[in-house]
Amino acid sequence: MSSNRLFALTPGEPAGIGPDLCLLLAREAQPQALVAIANVQMLSERAALLGLSINLVTVGPGNWPQQPAAAGSLYVWDTPLAVPVVPGQLNAANADYVLQTLTRAGQGCLDGHFAGMITAPVHKGVINEGGIAFSGHTEFLAELTHTEQVVMMLATHGLRVALVTTHLPLKDVAAAITPERLSRVTRILHHDLRTKFGIATPRILVCGLNPHAGEGGHLGREEIEVIEPTLEQLRSEGINLVGPLPADTLFTHKHLEHCDAVLSMYHDQGLPVLKYKGFGAAVNVTLGLPIIRTSVDHGTALDLAGSGQIDSGSLNVALQTAYAMAASQTPAS
């Protein structure tokens, strides 16, 4: 892995634990050059609150670092705040600041300055209160990169779970699982496992929608009418798919031992298993983008901002995943 790759790190909501996480990781040297896109003064104040002595080194366009920062140092692309930050207290005036950090990171990836971006949590509500329509990192980056379809995948040691549908009421899930949507999501998952994770022939296990994968139509016909025909078509394209399998038995060692990813039909079908297995050591990866983006698997934790009582495990996994993806990335075929 090249030691002069640049990666962007966005601390997310400035009143949350994102800035704390950035400062805590700076205590040790990173294997890659990492640039926090944040306000220098805010980071300096947060470091003092945490009792950390971190050397904040200002960088930016025309002045990018050529090697990883030393232990105790953090590269920062200084980004202006609208108002000073009080840890734990949201302020809608800084909504534009949060989006500016994401724009700088995403555009920097598109322009080739950064090999990937890693994001700490944002607070959707306060951004919307600031008068900016915002539904999340994923949708924002999809629009920024002009990407029509993206796929949410969470990963921890030994398990990757991608989602056909994400944040939908359960009553709307079945209607949303169309042949077109299932095909798009599966192709993106297969493509990115190959090109961003270096897996030559990914083996993907597919959950059924209904209990017992519909039990031959007795517990629902979505498997028969939508899922199975779509998987057959995708198999004819050379995609290695197993299923649809009952979700209650798919997530067992027997099945997971030889799979590269699980495709779950809805949010709470696959993610509770993954989070039970790896909460605090899991990463959120956005597939389908023309850039690498990983994120922590937790929220802003406003009540812990500035306390020093936080676990940086998920951020470390997000960083290591982004580094590994960049090293494994191959041209699309």
Image: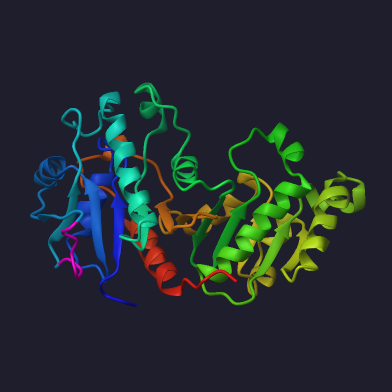
Left or right of 17, for residue 164: right
- SS majority, magenta: loop
> For the point 11% across and 52% down, which residue is it?
52
The residue positioned 44% from the left and 32% from the top of the image is 134
**Does the magenta portion include 272?**
no
Percent x, y of residue 70: 14, 68
Please state which of residues 222 and 270 is positioned toward the viewer in this rendering: 222
Q: Residue at x 60, y 55 (%)?
A: 162
**Does 28 appear above or below 55?**
below
Q: Is residue 300 left or right of residue 142?
A: left
Residue 88 position within the rendered picture, expressed as x and y whole percent measured from the top left = 25, 32
Residue 135's x, y, as percent?
Answer: 48, 34
Q: Quadrant of residue 319?
A: bottom left
Q: Nearer the viewer, residue 60 or 318?
A: 60
**35 over 219 or under it: above or below:** below
Give the magenta part as a residue range: 62-69
- Quarter placement of the C terminus: bottom right
x%, y% of residue 283? 45, 56
Q: Is residue 158 above or below residue 38?
A: below
Asked whether residue 64 is drawn in magenta, I would say: yes
Which quadrant of the figure contains the N terminus? bottom left
- Residue 38 position by quadrant: top left
